[in-house]
Structures are given as structure tokens and as C-alpha cells.
Image: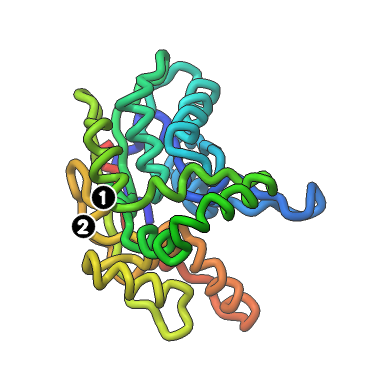
Amino acid sequence: MLKTEATPKYPIVLAHGLLGFDELHLAGSYFPGIHYWRGITEALAANGITVITASVPASASIEDRAAKLSENILKKAGGRSVNIIAHSMGGLDSRYMISRLKPPNVKVLSLTTIATPHRGSAFADYILERIGATRIPRIYKIMRSLGIETGAFGQLTQRYIQEDFNPRTPDLEGVRYFSYGATAQPSLWSAFRHSHRIVERAEGPNDGLVSVASSQWGDYKGTIPSVSHLDLINWTNRLRWLAWELTGNERKSVMPPVTLNDI
């Protein structure tokens, strides 16, 4: 996925999306943890790049996630300037941190977003409309009683992002902004088949959750073809690798190319 002709001088921060994490342990310390950025951190490290994996509340509001992202960078970067690569909602967290929080002792040189809904997602609109305004407070109350934060869900709609978030979150002068989008054609059995159809009707080509149009911010570097929203961070590919390994076939890389030469 990641191509570079020259090793970036400064650390790269990886900012995860909605419901993401840095490392998840489902069985305590008895089994290896599941990495959100698995394969990507190894690829960066192999190129001699210092990698910082941030961990923010999975479904909290952009404001709360951005504050935690700032804490992560402050703690792990050791005062060094950083470049951020963010997937999905992580790009909104990063933009808010850079523009609104402006944390002291955190110097961001560039932000590269991958499939970030910079103009919201029609699928978020669809889900909330299907639930219905009268039922949302009750559902949120139940989720919070289970320890699940709910601030993120209403902030991914097209209306919220375009009419509220974007106007009050301008780009910060001196920071370079890059972005990538992606397109997919989900198979009959794909988990993204339904969401892809909904987003396509409203916004056009998309990766199953985020449209190409919504992904564009700053210097748009291009559209990565034939990858879903989760392919972009290697998740769907793990199932393919498992199948190949179980059948004795060589493990193949199907990650899309993203260049780091600009940062």
C-alpha cells in the first residue's frame, strides 16, 4: 500500500476510524492482539520510518477523539514534528485537532486522509433515518448503559459535516493536506453491497461507505480502484490470506499503492 522513494524525516502518526483501535485483545494476554493497522505499520517500519499508532475512543464525538489524538501525539512523539495518515473518521479527528485544538508542543506537518467522509456519508443519513428521530435517544441511552459512546454517529451525516463541521474547521496555514478516495464493486455476498448501493445513488462512486467526492480534501492524490472501505487498511485481505494459507497457497499482497513521497 505504501510506497516511498525517500524515508520521511519525521514520525508518521496513524489515526484510526470509527470503531477502531490500535490493538485489540479478545482473549486477554493468552492470544496475540488484533492490530487495526496490521501490515501497514510493518511496511512503514521496513522503510525505516518511525510509526506512532494512536488510539482514541471508538465511537466518541469528533471533539473527544481529537482531544485523545492530541494526547497520544504529545506523549509518543517526544516533541518531534509529525505527519498524520488517517483512515475514515480519523481524518475528521485530525482536522479538528489541527484546526481547533491547536495543541501546544504538537507540530503537524501534513495530514493525509484515506476515505475520510469530508462531506459526510449518505449511509450515515440512511441509518439514522431508518432508526427514526423518536427512537434514537432511547437507543443511545441503552448503548451508553453498556459503556458504548454515541457521539460519533450523528456527526457523520452529510448535513452535519457540510453545514456545521466544515465551516468551523478550516485548514490551518502551514499544514499540507492530501487525500485519497477509493471505489469498489461489491460482490453479491459482500457486507458492503447494501451500503454501496445507497451511497452510489446519493453520491456516486464509493468504497462501500465513503464516496470519492466526499473523500477529496486538499491536494487529492487519486482514487484507489477495486478496494472496499476495509480493504484500505488490510482488514478484508486478512480473510483472503487465511484462505490462501489454509489451502497451501502463497500469501499475496493486494494492498493499494499510496505514495509517501510528498510528506
Marks 1 and 2, the one that precedes in the sequence: 1
Q: Which mark is residue 119?
A: 1
Residue 255 shows in the view: no
Q: Which mark is residue 219?
A: none
Residue furthest out toward the bottom: 188
Q: Which residue appears at 39% of the width and 67% of the height?
A: 228
Inspect the image, locate mark 1, and give the three-letter code of the amino acid beneath it.
Arg
The quarter of the rendered structure image containing the C terminus is top left
Mark 1 or 2, which is nearer the eye? 1
Above or below 88: residue 238: below
Q: Which residue appears at 28% of the width and 49% of the height?
A: 159
Relative depth, front residue between 208 and 223: 208
Residue 196 shows in the view: yes
Q: Which mark is residue 213?
A: 2
Q: Which residue appears at 46% of the width and 26% of the height?
A: 70
The quarter of the rendered structure image containing the N terminus is bottom left
Q: Which residue appears at 22% of the width and 45% of the height?
A: 217
Q: CA distance from mark 1 to mark 2?
A: 8 Å
Relative depth, front residue between 57 and 176: 57
Above or below 20: residue 189: below
Q: Position of residue 183 (x, y in %)?
A: 29, 67
Above or below 137: residue 127: below
Q: Position of residue 184 (x, y in %)?
A: 33, 71
Q: Are marks 1 and 2 in contact (CB under 8 Å)?
A: yes
